[in-house]
Image (cartoon, rainbow, N blue to C red):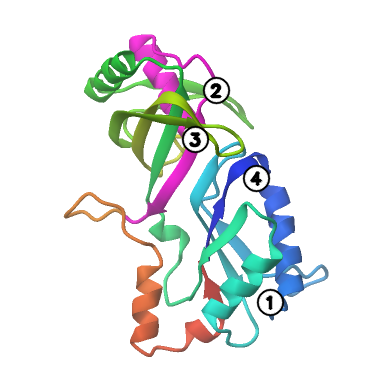
Amino acid sequence: MRYAKRGRLRFTSHRDISRAVERAVRRAGIPVAYSAGFSPHPKISYAGAAPTGVASEAEYLEIGVTTPCDPEQVRQDLDGSLPPGLDVLDVVAAGPGGLADRLEVSDWEVRLPGADRELAEVAAEKFLAAGTVEVERLTKKGPRRFDAREAVLGLTVSEGTDRTAAQVLGGPCVILRMVVRHMTPAVRPDDVLTGLRLVADFAPPVPPEVTRLAQGPLDASTGALADPLDLDRDTTRGGEAGPASEHVAG
């Protein structure tokens, strides 16, 4: 399943989203499978979840079910059972292979209200020209330093209009588009912004608004992101019903 995290729901933690999904699955009557053992849990797994405070048009999860389900009916029922701002966009029957392994790259949009476009362009050029850009982030294990440059496959600067929390268009703002490879440790948009400050002293005057537009496998021939669910769609069209009868994936 691909779902979106929009508006004020971007401030919802992953744990709260998990609870909302579990309640919605029960409310929608989806025949979810449960794990074995003393404390069974619904078989719902998440892949590549965006950080708290970040909106997304491309979040993914898999649901194990006990009986075959119609993907479009699951999409409608689950979408109707989730709060506005958590919107189910696509559901397919799962084919072979792991979904998480296909999420290789993310395409991010970072809106910077009040920032200077020329300064942003200079900073982006210096960042891309650098061999390495070491940044530091506080993790659960304490401060950690890593290279933010290696993961960035593309970084462009444009100009658009700001959006308020109510999604009302406001004044002009600088827009960064960055394509970032999934690595360990994960390089996030705020790490790239830290890198821009280090290489060019560029810092937005107000907190940025970050949205993940897509994530998936990288097409080596075109450099574009592919839909991670296309493989499942191709398997379903080919008539291979084994794994598809056991899982609904997204």
Ranked by sequence position, the earlier of labels 1 and 2 is 1
User: Which class describes the residues within 10 Å of circle 4: few (<14), some (14-19), or many (20+)?
Assistant: some
Drawn side of residue 209 relative to residue 81, left or right: left
Residue 146 seen anywhere in this rendered image of the structure:
no
The residues bearing labels 2 and 3 have C-alpha atoms spaced at a distance of 9 Å
Of the residues shown, which amino acid type is indicated by label 3? Answer: Val
The residues bearing labels 4 and 2 have C-alpha atoms spaced at a distance of 17 Å
Residue 194 is inside the magenta segment: yes
Secondary structure of the residue carrying tag 4 is helix
Secondary structure of the residue carrying tag 3 is strand
Ranked by sequence position, the earlier of labels 3 and 4 is 4
Can you identify the residue that label 1 sits on? Answer: 32
Of the residues shown, which amino acid type is indicated by label 1? Answer: Val
- The stretch of residues the image draws in magenta is 189-217
Residue 218 is inside the magenta segment: no
Can you identify the residue that label 4 sits on? Answer: 9
Q: Given contact means CB atoms under 8 Å apart, are the residues at marks 2 and 3 in contact?
A: no
Drawn side of residue 87 relative to residue 158, left or right: right
* Residue 178 horizontal/vertical position (percent): 35, 36
